[in-house]
């Protein structure tokens, strides 16, 4: 499905109709030659060392100046915090910086960021949930009629998309006005905007399509693939003779596999490894309500219902 017979499994017209209001004709919502063209250009930009360095610098700065101080303050006050929300805001700040060099400052202690950026994040999240609602309707005509009459969830979705697309277009037009200076920017949008053949609609779709990711939740919990202990926490399952041995992406498709392998995989690993290395070294983390199994909600991105409440405590430094 994902590689040798890839052409037989396109996104399809139904998926396109469901998502086009949100994702346009971007890389996540296109097939055939349109997808191949975008994929080729995006792959070229993601392979550049300058973009990878920009990713690393952005993540390290977000950890040092926002994440660690936030955890430290929560530990000193004995506060319970939602780790899911913290990591989502961390990722949103980092991705916005890498994709279009904007800092919404969602993880900042004070509201130092642009309120418009924060509104964009909230609108983006709510729009995702309403789009998923389209897939849940028993009949496609249900949401289409609501859209035609501009009522209920479809009216709300229209309002949210106006915020999302308006914010994206504002940034894009600002970039185009600074076309001669774009070579000085390392963000992904500036790299695409430097090509005068790209329309504003194409660039808008770039902004919204690196902000969405998929889920392989069910496949990661199949006994036929992982055995009877598939639901157990066993880090050693990823080791062979004490060395990390990654699974085939076709068996563990967290970042998809084949021609649609996630281009943001490296950035995700940079974030995960950096956070784990910096946080585990400095803090003890206790999950509040450990007796409960997290309930996951259906969304374009995998989320836990009610978040992940934790308490943190800074580790005492040992003197030599």
Image: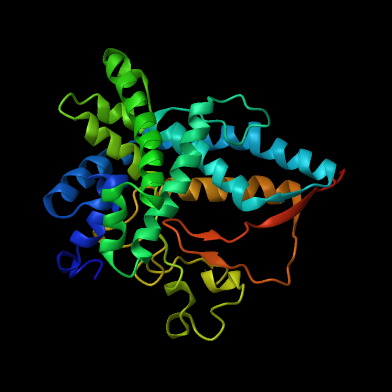
| Render colour scheme | rainbow
294 shown above or below 69: below
Across and down, in percent, residue 309 comes to 70, 56
Residue at the far right in the pictured view: 319
Marks counted in the figure total 0
Residue at image coords 19%, 30%: 199
Q: Quadrant of the N terminus?
A: bottom left
Give the side of residue 102 with respect to residue 309, left or right: left
Residue at x 29% of width, y 35% of height:
204
Is 9 left or right of 116, judged from the image as shown?
Answer: left
Which quarter of the rendered picture does the C terminus lie within? top right
Depth order, front residue of 60/179: 179
Side of 20 relative to 135 (left or right): left
Residue 75 at x, y = what percent?
A: 80, 45
Q: Is residue 287 visible?
A: yes
x, y percentage for residue 306? 63, 58
- Rendered residue at 26%/30% (across/down): 192
Front position in the image: 320 or 128: 128
Task: Give the camera-side residue of 123 and 12.
Answer: 123
Position of residue 233 relative to residue 277, above or below, is below
Q: Can I make out residue 57 in this image?
A: no
Q: In this image, 309 relative to 79: left or right?
A: left
The image shows residue 90, relative to residue 234, as above or below, that is: above
Residue located at (65% from left, 57% from top):
308
Residue at the extreme left: 33
- Answer with the quarter of the image where residue 72 lies: top right
């Amino acid at each position: 499905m994902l590689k040798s017979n890839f052409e037989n499994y396109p996104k399809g017209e139904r998926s396109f109709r469901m998502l086009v209001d949100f994702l346009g004709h971007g890389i996540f919502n296109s097939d055939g030659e349109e997808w191949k063209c975008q994929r080729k250009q995006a792959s070229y930009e993601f392979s550049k060392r300058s973009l990878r360095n920009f990713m690393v610098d952005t993540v390290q700065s977000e950890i040092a100046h926002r994440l660690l101080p936030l955890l430290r303050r929560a530990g000193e006050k004995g506060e319970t915090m939602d780790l899911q929300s913290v990591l989502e805001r961390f990722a949103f700040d980092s991705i916005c910086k890498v994709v279009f060099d904007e800092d919404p400052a969602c993880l900042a202690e004070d509201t130092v960021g642009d309120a418009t950026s924060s509104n964009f994040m909230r609108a983006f999240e709510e729009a995702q949930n309403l789009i998923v609602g389209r897939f849940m309707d028993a009949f496609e005509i249900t949401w289409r009629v609501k859209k035609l009459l501009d009522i209920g969830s479809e009216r709300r979705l229209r309002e949210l998309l106006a915020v999302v697309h308006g914010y994206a277009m504002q940034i894009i037009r600002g970039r185009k006005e600074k076309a001669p200076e774009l070579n000085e920017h390392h963000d992904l949008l500036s790299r695409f905007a430097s090509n005068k053949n790209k329309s504003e609609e194409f660039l808008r779709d770039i902004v919204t399509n690196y902000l969405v990711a998929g889920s392989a939740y069910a496949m990661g919990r199949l006994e036929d693939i992982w055995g009877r202990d598939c639901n157990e926490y066993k880090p050693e399952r990823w080791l062979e003779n004490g060395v990390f041995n990654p699974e085939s992406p076709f068996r563990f498709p967290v970042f998809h596999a084949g021609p649609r392998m996630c281009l943001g995989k490296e950035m995700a690993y940079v974030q995960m490894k950096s956070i784990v290395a910096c946080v585990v070294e400095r803090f003890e983390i206790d999950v509040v309500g450990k007796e409960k199994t997290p309930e996951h909600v259906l969304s374009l991105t995998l989320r836990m219902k009610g978040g992940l409440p934790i308490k943190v405590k800074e580790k005492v430094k040992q003197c030599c």
